[in-house]
Amino acid sequence: MMSQSAPDAIAVHGLSAGYPGVLALEQVDLTVTPGRLCALVGANGSGKSTLFAALLGLRAPAAGRVRLFGRSPQAARRRNLVSYVPQHDQVDHSFPVTVEQTVMMGRYGHMGFTRRPRTADRERVGAALDQVGLGGLRTRTIGELSGGQRRRAFLARSIAQEAPLMLLDEPFAGVDRASEELIVSVLHQLRDAGTTLLVSTHHLEGIPELAEEVVLLHRTVLASGPPEAVLTEERLARAFGTVLGLGPQLPGSEGQR
Ligand SMILES: Nc1ncnc2c1ncn2[C@@H]1O[C@H](COP(=O)(O)OP(=O)(O)OP(=O)(O)O)[C@@H](O)[C@H]1O
């Protein structure tokens, strides 16, 4: 925000957005500077997925403005500035597409209209699969993976896309501890290589280890900043609508819609 020459990776001002009869987001202000890993936290229905949709230009603002690297979401997507790992993948798991083919989809924006992979595309896909620990499963079909492996495959697809901003909706939902540790370490590697990441999560205990910044969402931004400043009992009580200790599971932590 300070510098004219280096725009924020994410700059959201006064954003309101929703659905007929539902104002899911109201007056949201959010900035993420390039190279940061920011966690997005909020109860079920607090507007996280709607915010991702607005950032991707898939849901038009009722009010306010969204800019990614100084550009509209549509322009940012056209220029491959942003990739997205959805909470629920839309792939038909009975369709016999392999892990490698799925990850190759992340390269489509680099290939031109023929969509014919070149050596560089194959190398990027192989490296992304190795990075998420799926190098040995590249010829399996997506339907033959476990839920946690499948989430890693979709992370690899996003890595292969090589966009400077990655949005991840609940990457830890339904994954075991080992997969979570692997995903955290991959996200740190991406951040250390200069990628900006916005990661929604219900796993509050993991946030200090995951991210240097956290945004607490409850239709609007309740607080943002370093985890230890944001994740106070009082603020969490406001965000989650209850008084809670930081137990292993929190109300609304099942990741269901
Ligand atoms: N397609 C839709 N039509 C109408 N209302 C919707 C739609 N999608 C979401 N909503 C409503 O918008 C609000 C925000 O939902 P959203 O999915 O953005 O929350 P979320 O924080 O992602 O929740 P979760 O943690 O459960 O994924 C909720 O009140 C929800 O019921």
Image (cartoon, helix red, strand yellow):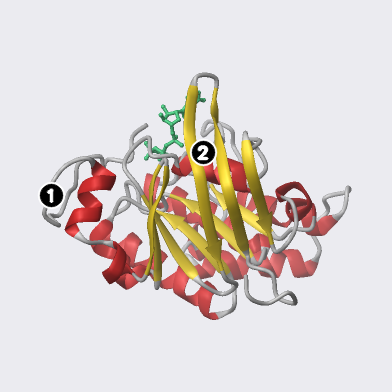
User: Which amino acid, by three-letter code, is at mark 2?
Assistant: Thr
Considering only vertical position in the picture, is 42 above or below 19?
below
User: Which amino acid, by three-letter code, is at mark 1?
Assistant: Leu
Q: Quadrant of the C terminus?
A: top left
Element on which disc 2 rests: helix
- 1 and 2 marks in contact (CB < 8 Å): no
Crowding around mark 2 (Cα neighbors within 10 Å: few <14, some 14 to 19, many 20+) is: some
What residue is disc 1 on? 244
Residue 125, image x, y percentages = 64, 63
The answer to which of 181 and 209 lies nearer the viewer is 209
- Which residue is at the far bottom? 192
Marker disc for residue 24: none
Which mark is first along the chain, 2 or 1? 2
Question: Is 133 placed left or right of 83 in the picture?
Answer: left
What residue is disc 2 on? 50
The answer to which of 112 and 76 lies nearer the viewer is 76
- Is ligand 1 less than 8 Å from the beta carbon at label 2? yes
Crowding around mark 1 (Cα neighbors within 10 Å: few <14, some 14 to 19, many 20+) is: few
Residue located 16% across and 42% down the image: 242
Residue 169, image x, y percentages = 46, 48
Q: Which quadrant contains ligand 1?
A: top left
